[in-house]
């Protein structure tokens, strides 16, 4: 395990302070052969939205360490809109877990539907002596029952991730 570039924990932050929203118009260059948004494009937008959220929370550049629990629930067609919302679910030592929820929208009618969601882990990094090193992140201040439930689930996912990494060596 790498020693963090700073060992002093920054002040805690609330999830609402780093919530991030993105709106994308699905165009032909984003589509698969069926005329609906390509899964890889959805992942790229999820990654971007989560990265901004992670940087807002940690106050540092953050790199994607792991995507898990990604699920695609419904398609979005060319001409429709994708709405992404990212929030921190838990902050650990140098990493944070971000939940990104994705909805489709038919802009003329305002109809919306769930499209996908993912949990993404980011590691905050800082350049010291020309080398990128993980850096300590602010704790997450849980303000509601929902915050606490999301954080408890995130700690369980982290335990599974760490066990998986240990097994893989
Ligand atoms: C992520 C990365 C910085 C971790 O560096 P490392 O030297 O392994 O650092 P450590 O072992 O000290 O781990 C640092 C943190 O990363 C977490 N981490 C490392 N690999 C992980 C993985 N596969 N999944 C989830 N978390 C991971 C650790 O749990 C630790 O978090 P914690 O401090 O909150 O407990 C490094 O593996 C890396 O640079 N990966 C490539 C990132 C990248 O290029 N992403 C795509 C473009 S942004």
Image (cartoon, rainbow, N blue to C red):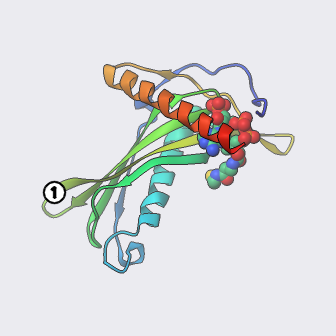
Whole-percent x, y for residue 71 in the image = 38, 53
73 up-or-down from 100: above or below: below
In the image, farthest residue toward the bottom = 33
State the residue at coordinates (37%, 74%).
Answer: 31
Looking at the image, residue 101 sits to the left or right of residue 66; the answer is: left
Q: Residue at x 23, y 58 (%)?
A: 105
The residue tagged 1 is 110
Depth check, front residue: 20 or 47: 47
**Quadrant where the N terminus lies?**
top right
Q: How many marks?
A: 1
- Residue 124 in view: no
Residue 112 percent across, percent down from the top left: 20, 54
Quarter containing the C terminus: top right
Q: Which element is circle 1 on?
A: loop
Q: Quadrant holding ligand 1?
A: top right
Residue density around tag 1, few if under 14, some if 14–19, many if 20 or more, within 10 Å: few
Q: Can you see residue 129? A: yes
Q: Is residue 145 above or below residue 165?
A: above
Residue 15 point in image, percent of width and height: 43, 29
Q: Residue at 55% of width from left, 30% of height from top?
A: 159
Tell me where residue 92 sits by quadrant.
top right
Q: Does residue 107 appear to the left or right of 72 in the view shown?
A: left
Q: What's the residue at 55%, 22% (across, down)? A: 139
> Relative to residue 73, is residue 93 depicted above or below?
above
């Amino acid at each position: 395990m790498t020693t963090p570039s700073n060992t002093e924990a920054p002040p805690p932050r609330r999830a609402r302070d780093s919530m991030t929203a993105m709106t994308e118009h699905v165009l032909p260059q984003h589509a698969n052969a069926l005329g609906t948004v390509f899964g890889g494009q959805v992942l790229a937008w999820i990654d971007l939205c989560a990265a901004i959220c992670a940087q807002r929370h940690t106050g540092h550049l953050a790199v994607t360490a792991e995507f898990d629990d990604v699920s695609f629930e419904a398609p979005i067609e060319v001409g429709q809109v994708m709405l992404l919302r990212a929030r921190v679910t838990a902050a650990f030592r140098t990493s944070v877990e971000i939940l990104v929820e994705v909805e489709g929208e038919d802009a003329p009618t305002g109809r919306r539907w769930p499209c996908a969601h993912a949990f993404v882990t980011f590691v905050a990094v800082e350049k010291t002596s020309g080398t990128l090193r993980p850096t300590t992140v602010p704790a997450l201040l849980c303000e509601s029952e929902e915050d606490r439930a999301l954080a408890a689930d995130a700690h369980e996912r982290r335990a599974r991730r760490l066990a998986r990494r240990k097994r893989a060596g």
